[in-house]
Amino acid sequence: MSGSAHLPDPAVLAVAADNLTVRGDSFANTVEGLHGSWRGGLEQSYKAPEQEQVHALLTGPRVSAQALRDSTHRAAQALRLFAEGAADVISRRKMLVEQLENYGRQIHAQADPAVDEALFTSRANTLADDYRDLEDACINALDALQRNTTDAFSTYGPRDPHADVNAATAAYNKLADGRSTDPQRNLGMLLRRMDLMTLEELNRFKADNPGWELAAAPAGLDPEATKELWASLRHPEFLITALPLLVGNLEGIPYVDRAEANLLALGAAAARHGLTTEQEAAYATIRKSLVSPFQPLSRFLIAFDPSVVPPLAAVSIGNVDDADYVTVNVPGMEATSERMTDWTDAAQGLYDGQGEVDANSSHAVVAWMNYSTPGPLSTFEVLHSDLARAGGDRLAVSLTGFHTALGDGPFLAVAAHSYGTPTAGNGLANIDFEVDAAVLYASAGMDSATPDAENLRVAVDSDGNPQVYATQASADNLAGLGILGSQLAGDGRLGAAHFLFGAKVFSSDGDGVLAPTDEHTPFTGRVEAIESQGYLDRGTESLNSISKITMGRGGLVEVTGPFPRLDIEQRRLTHPQLFGPRF
């Protein structure tokens, strides 16, 4: 019952609200009278070229006084509503206390103390939650009031050193416990209150909330509202150090801020006791992936999730905030953060290829290891689209964050390899804006939920065709096995390079000058054309084409298709393998 103890007296609050209204009215009326006397008296006695300026000297204070009266009325109303709600909570608490006392005196044979204790605890928690909601509503209403003049100094009573810490802790607990019914409002309460704290108060907040370093960002936030909230803060640098994991994964805020915060969160996660060998290896590899072999090129940890094993992460090659071209590269089967350096090497390969296409424009490639990928073929996970759908939801959130934080300025593209292609398809189908281009390479088959390139939210060319490109090297047999396996024993996926999907298909088999891709791997790091190479290796036709497409030069890539499409019923007749397992 401690959460609803020591509540303020509603009657005292109601009197204070009435006094506030009276004083606001009195002040405004006094200034109104002064204004009338000043102007009325001077108009009769003061005649000069500058008389209008003199006559209007009290117009500004008059307007400010009227605004102050409006503010005191709104503040008084907030206090009255709080008092009414507090009176209700106090009444319900009194009844609950009486029931508990009677229960202790009249316990009977049919009573189940365990069940009854849970019931009473739930009711007590509801009272505490209702009171916190009242506090939040009142504080939000008071926070919304703005001072309307700087013509005079304000005098305030002594500041309560615990008010901001207590209010921030209440909002923090709601978010951390998953009890928030309005995460955006509670996030605003938390960050605004912490933004007002002194360093001493921030330290007190950390002491009161020992999980602060790895408190996660809540789901269901509006990136646009979060962007505005972050921009309104006075000291975001304090919040980066006070809530690193939460700040590091807020969609809509600058990525340099997220990266700084996530680096702190990575250190905190890696320093925990009782980590598994898998976790330790993943954290070490993520940290290693942030070291660029090409100085002064920087890398940024723009997303980090240590709540799963192995952890999830996204590393940007180049500064996303300043880039003219941003590419999000989505991995496939068996890609985990334990091998994060493999995926950042692949992203580096694409980054370098883009630089050869356009050396004068800034660009960034995101190694997006931010979903749980299928295990090896022996697990058969790759034959089903469950992980692609869950990963697609996460990708859609990330893409919306890029779009919100960066606006419409940069060229935003998605590239995806192997099982990353159905993941990308689901993500691109679940956004409410268009990316500029998508490249699906070595596809393990597109999910039946996105059977056509037109289902993806991708910009179209002058002929109305979506700027969705696909390729599969002739020597890449593994991608075909994934597609066939899904059709025989999975959920019937269609290859992205298949004519029915409707993508613009380009070759990865070499053209006599550029080398062929001759394995499923995205990147090997080999530079000799006589050796086996992946899709993003230097000197390959595939890297050259993918670089052009993701830098807005897709028109320079030789493609076939898209071909005329069949409607869904025609597909069921001609390609039944695409509509579920045959065995």
Image (cartoon, helix red, strand yellow):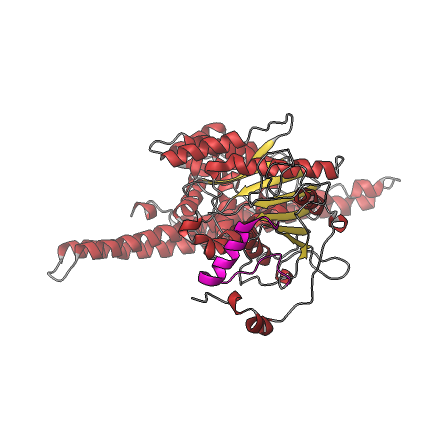
Q: Nearer the viewer, residue 56 or 522?
A: 522
Where 461 falls versus 147 (above or below)? below
Q: In the displayed structure, does residue 460 sit left or right of residue 256? A: right
Q: In front here: 483 or 267?
A: 483
Residue 479 lies in magenta, yes or no?
yes
Looking at the rendered image, the quarter that the C terminus falls into is bottom left
**Residue shown at 46% from the left, 37% from the top:** 338
Left or right for 23, reference 169: right
**Residue furthest top as drawn:** 295
Residue occupying the point 46% across, 57% down: 384
Q: How many marks?
A: 0
Q: Is residue 118 above or below residue 329?
A: below
Q: Nearer the viewer, residue 5 or 325?
A: 325
Judged from this view, the residue extending furthest toward the left is: 109
Compared with 142, 351 (above or below) is above
Residue 116, visible in the rendered structure: yes
- Looking at the picture, does residue 201 appear above or below residue 48? above
Q: Is 80 within the magenta? A: no
Q: Position of residue 153 (x, y in %)?
A: 62, 34
The image shows residue 39 at horizontal and vertical percentages of 76, 46
Residue lying at the far right in this picture: please name it: 49
- Measuring 65% from the left and 43% from the top, which residue is drawn there? 516
Region rendered in magenta:
473-499
Q: Percent position (x, y) of residue 61?
A: 69, 43
> Residue 535: x, y in percent?
61, 43
- State left or right for residue 231 relative to residue 5: right
In the image, taking residue 404 as reference, residue 211 lies left or right, namely left
Examine the rendering and report whether any part of residue 240 can be seen: no
